[in-house]
Image: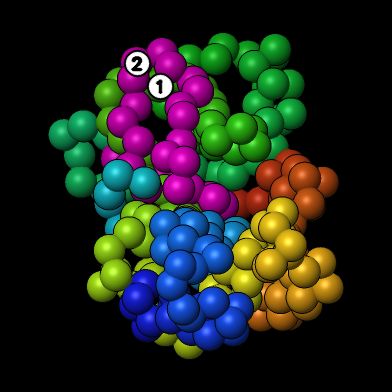
């Protein structure tokens, strides 16, 4: 289903099919994009372990903290590919508290062994690298691009496309306009979206996920 079809179906359910529209196409397109990202955050729909702009992070000598691409949502595993080598070196995922504790006791420079996500769109490697290379991450991410052109299609699987309409309705029924605002219908649309994609993870759930200690598989694994 492309963006034009999503907008048409949303207009039908909004009873907003006659110009001048109560809700503009630009708003509906923006909410479709927002809904797709929200669905990916809740249900982890897009897994990516191919080298690319979201999954590949260049390492700098002595630098221990690296900013993630805004589309990176949940890091699953991490490996390093050192310059001049072809074999990937697996990192262990641990909590940031472990890295802080370790850094107080031993040297913070060497060949990285551990990676931690700090919840602020950054990852920390320990020890800090003493040679150049790059991080290769396997992760769940948000869509690569916004839905702008009528022919654009959501990146998530087709069976989930109609679920985005619920988010578009949820946002539309919140408009502060007596001709369209409907708190009850907004709540129903959000309920249907949540039934499809799950609850939004809380900050505490995300923190506990980051802080639990676990060992990764090789690059490309789950």
> Can residue 100 be seen by looking at this rendering?
yes
Q: Is residue 66 magenta?
A: yes
The alpha-carbon separation of the residues under discs 1 and 2 comes to 5 Å
How far from the left and from the top, in percent, is residue 109? 48, 15
Residue 36 magenta-highlighted: no
* Residue at x 34%, y 16% (from the top left corner): 61
- Percent across and percent down for residue 126 are 54, 26
Query: Is residue 34 shown above or below 70?
Result: below
The 10 Å Cα crowd at callout 2, few under 14, some 14 to 19, many 20 or more, is: few
| Circle on res. 199 | none
| Rendered position, 204 above or below 22 | above
Determine whether label 1 and label 2 are within 8 Å by CB. yes
Q: Which mark is residue 61?
A: 2
Q: Secondary structure at mark 1?
A: strand
Q: Nearer the viewer, residue 51 or 190?
A: 190
Span colored in magenta: 55-81
Where residue 113 sits in the image (x, y, percent)? 50, 34
Q: How is the image coloured?
A: rainbow
Taking the spot 45% from the left edge, 67% from the top edge, the residue there is: 20
- Give the mark nearest the N terminus, 1 or 2: 2
Toward the viewer: 123 or 141?
Answer: 141
Direction from residue 167 to residue 75 in the image, left or right: left
Q: Main secondary structure of the magenta part?
A: strand
Is 124 positioned to the left or the right of 102 in the image?
A: left
Above or below for 197 versus 159: above
Above or below for 218 versus 204: below
| Residue 116 shows in this picture | no
The residue wearing badge 1 is 129
Report the quarter where the N terminus lies: bottom left
């Amino acid at each position: 289903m492309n963006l034009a079809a999503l907008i048409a179906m949303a207009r039908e359910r909004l009873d907003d099919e006659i110009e001048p529209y109560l809700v503009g196409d630009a708003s509906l397109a923006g909410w479709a994009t927002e809904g797709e990202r929200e669905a990916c955050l809740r249900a982890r729909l897009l897994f990516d372990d191919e080298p690319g702009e979201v999954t590949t992070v260049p390492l700098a000598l002595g630098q221990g903290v690296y900013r993630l691409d805004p589309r990176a949502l949940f890091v699953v595993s991490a490996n390093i590919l050192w310059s001049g080598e072809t074999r990937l070196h697996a990192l262990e995922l641990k909590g940031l508290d472990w890295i802080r504790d370790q850094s107080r006791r031993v040297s913070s420079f060497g060949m990285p062994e551990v990676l931690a996500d700090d919840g602020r769109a950054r990852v920390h490697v320990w020890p800090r690298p003493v040679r150049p290379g790059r991080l290769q991450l396997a992760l769940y991410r948000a869509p690569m691009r916004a839905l702008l052109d009528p022919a654009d299609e959501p990146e998530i699987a087709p069976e989930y496309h109609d679920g985005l309409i619920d988010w578009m309705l949820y946002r539309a029924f919140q408009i502060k306009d007596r001709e369209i605002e409907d708190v009850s219908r907004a709540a129903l649309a959000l309920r249907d979206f949540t039934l499809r994609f799950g609850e939004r993870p809380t900050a505490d759930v995300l923190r506990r996920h980051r802080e639990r200690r676990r060992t990764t598989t090789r690059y490309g694994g789950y």
